[in-house]
Amino acid sequence: MGFSTDAIHVGQEPDPTTGAIIVPIYQTSTYVQEELGKHKGYEYSRTSNPTRAALERNLAALEGGRFGFAFASGMAAINAVMTLFKAGDHIISAHNLYGGTFRLFERVLKDFGLTFSYSDTARLGQAEAAFQPNTRLLYVETPTNPLMEITDIAAAASLAHRHGALLAVDNTFMSPYFQRPLALGADIVLHSTTKYLNGHSDGVGGAVILDDARLGDRLKFIQNAAGAVLGPMDSWLVLRGVKTLAVRMSQHNENGMAVAEFLAKHPKVKNVHYPGLPAHPQHALARKQMSGFGAMISFETGSLENAKKVLKSVRLCSLAESLGGVETLISHPATMTHASVPPEERRRLGITDGLVRISVGIEDVEDLIADLDHALASV
Ligand SMILES: *Cc1c(COP(=O)(O)O)cnc(C)c1O
């Protein structure tokens, strides 16, 4: 079946007791058993819950994997994946990561004996040089936040596999509608469902999808043992969001392209980072591995003062962290999402004080462009 059909139907058979077309919010901790050892497949909601199970089946189908796991947040999902590894294992990670992921690696997991190297995975030669005999995982986000740099997923998968390591891809920015890492050779796909999968800025959650049965069994064990599961209400909200993922993503993409083209032509804007623009240095790779370019854009205003003026002058775009909702959010990476990255490291990555990031929503695009045009006039 097609993507939208799967998004609307997989894991969502009508409720067997009432016929309800929508999977109910099974807000229950436990399940009554008929007799010792005889139950209906559910014993305790940390282990398994019907609403969460519906979401997990659905997300697995959309990413093309056999196993899906829903967690209490994107960070809980990433943390669960990292506990597939053990003290002494080495992980090579992309150097430009979601700030919370970098913080988890450096300030929590290092203390448990995992070792990390960081390299620019948009230039895989650099990652190749970082492999060690104990390297077990290559970890990437593509496109990156906020500069929209792209890692070649198929090439990264073969590089990892040549060295006996796995490839994990954080697919939050693209969603399975535009990018399916498992089909390109990745072993593990991660999501902050808080962003596009939920899509309505009303819940925090995370997910892991994979296809290998041995990894699937282990992650199922970890999910239950460590217990950072997504609750029934939040699982239901993501299920509800995913039904419109295809129509939302195609509108996000259309609006993203229009806003990027407007910014690229604007005399006050120095540089626009958006993989859909032919001027993007990896536009060809983006076309090859993604079926759309999404709605995350960053652009250079030239200085902190200019960035401040733009952020202060917008009326429709909301100044806020996060992304992937139906409403447009605008933010300042250097002082918001990347504030914990030391200034010299920010400079090295290209995250300047004048950089502004937009998560383009699905409002009428003329209104968004008028708002940005008005804000840029203040520069
Ligand atoms: C938001 C985000 C996360 C963390 O997810 P939470 O749901 O906030 O815990 C991880 N990776 C990326 C790319 C994100 O944007």
Image (tube, rainbow, N blue to C red):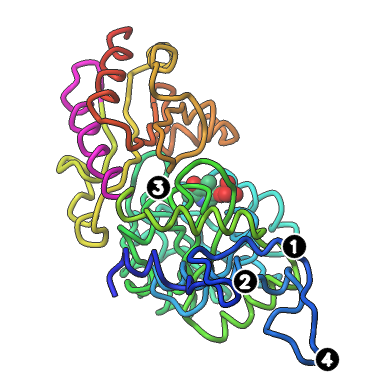
Disc 3, SS: loop
**Mark 2 or mark 3: whose residue is earlier in sequence:** 2
Contact, mark 1 vs mark 4 (Cβ under 8 Å): no
Question: Range of the magenta residues?
Answer: 249-270
Residue position marked by numbered label 3 in the rendering: 144
**Residue 259 seen anywhere in this rendered image of the structure:** yes
Query: Which residue is at a point 51% across and 55% down the rendered structure image?
Result: 238
Query: Which residue is at a point 62% across and 65% down the rendered structure image?
Result: 82
Nearest to the eye among marks 3 and 4: give it: 4
Locate residue 122: give its quadrant: bottom left
Disc 4, SS: loop
**Mark 1 or mark 4: whose residue is earlier in sequence:** 4
Q: Which mark is residue 50?
A: 2
Disc 2 to disc 4, how far (Cα)?
Answer: 20 Å
Residue position marked by numbered label 1 in the rendering: 112
Amino acid at pointer 2:
Pro
Amino acid at pointer 1:
Phe
